[in-house]
Amino acid sequence: MFINWAAKEIVFKIVYYGPALSGKTTNLKYIYNRLDPGLRGSLVTLQTQEERTLFFDFLQLHLGEVLGRKPRFNLYTVPGQSYYAYSRKIILNGADGVVFVADSQRSRIEDNLESLLDLEERLIEQGRTLQRIPFVIQYNKRDLPDAAPVEWLQQKLNYYNFPQFEAVATEGRGVMETLRRVLHAVIENVQTRPTLRERVV
């Protein structure tokens, strides 16, 4: 979180995390295309060997002011492959909220677990934990034949009972609902934590 004093904006960073090809990029591209072009910045794409890393920012007018300033959000995806660990660490640094995009296929459960463990380790390195950051899980690819029951995925991945959404990102199902939940969680976190308020006022 940082403040753009000239624009009177408070800027939040939200990172979409998860294993390779789970749908992080698809989420961000859908969101980008749904937003008013006058309220969003350019979509920046960094091509890796197997997966793209995306970034864009947008202004959320309908949320009103946050601590007297307009909220702007920077959305990032991270590359999921294990050999991009350093890139994930850099992108995650300073994140105000995280969306974990899980691949619902049973065959990808180990990849999901490995990515979730990696996320926890990166946060611990920064002196934070999952319980202390706005966090939402999205179970993507619910339309595939191998999609596991949500109850089973909850037992395997959501041991802290975080908010969760089912999604088919290629169709836009569950994408905006996931985004809205993490946006509100981030704003609520700032407004209810005195230490964060003191950084703004």
Image (spheres, rainbow, N blue to C red):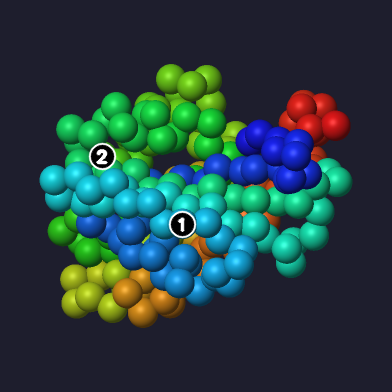
Q: Amino acid at mark 1?
A: Ser
Disc 2 is placed on an element classified as: helix
Query: Badges 2 and 1: C-beta atoms under 8 Å apart?
Result: no
**Callout 1: SS:** loop
Q: Nearer the viewer, residue 173 or 67?
A: 67
Q: Find residue 114 and name its label.
A: 2
**50, above or below 180, in the image:** above
Can residue 39 be seen here? The reply is yes
Comparing labels 2 and 1, the label whose residue is closer to the camera: 1
| Residue ID at (32%, 51%) | 45
What amino acid type should be assigned to the residue bearing mark 2? Glu
Say which quarter of the image contains residue 101. Answer: bottom left
The residue lying at 27 percent from left, 58 percent from top is 22
Query: Where residue 113 sits: x, y (%)?
Result: 28, 44
User: Going 70% across and 51% down the picture, which residue do you hit?
Assistant: 71
Could you tell me which residue is drawn at 29 percent across and 70 percent down?
Answer: 141
Tell me the distance, in whole angstroms, between the alpha carbons under discs 2 and 1: 32 Å
Q: Is residue 35 left or right of residue 146?
A: right
Whether residue 175 is situated above or below residue 49 in the rendered picture: below
Q: Which residue is mark 1?
A: 42
**In the drawing, does residue 7 fall left or right of residue 126?**
right
Q: Quadrant of the N terminus?
A: top right
Q: Residues within 10 Å of mark 2 (few under 14, many from 20)?
A: some
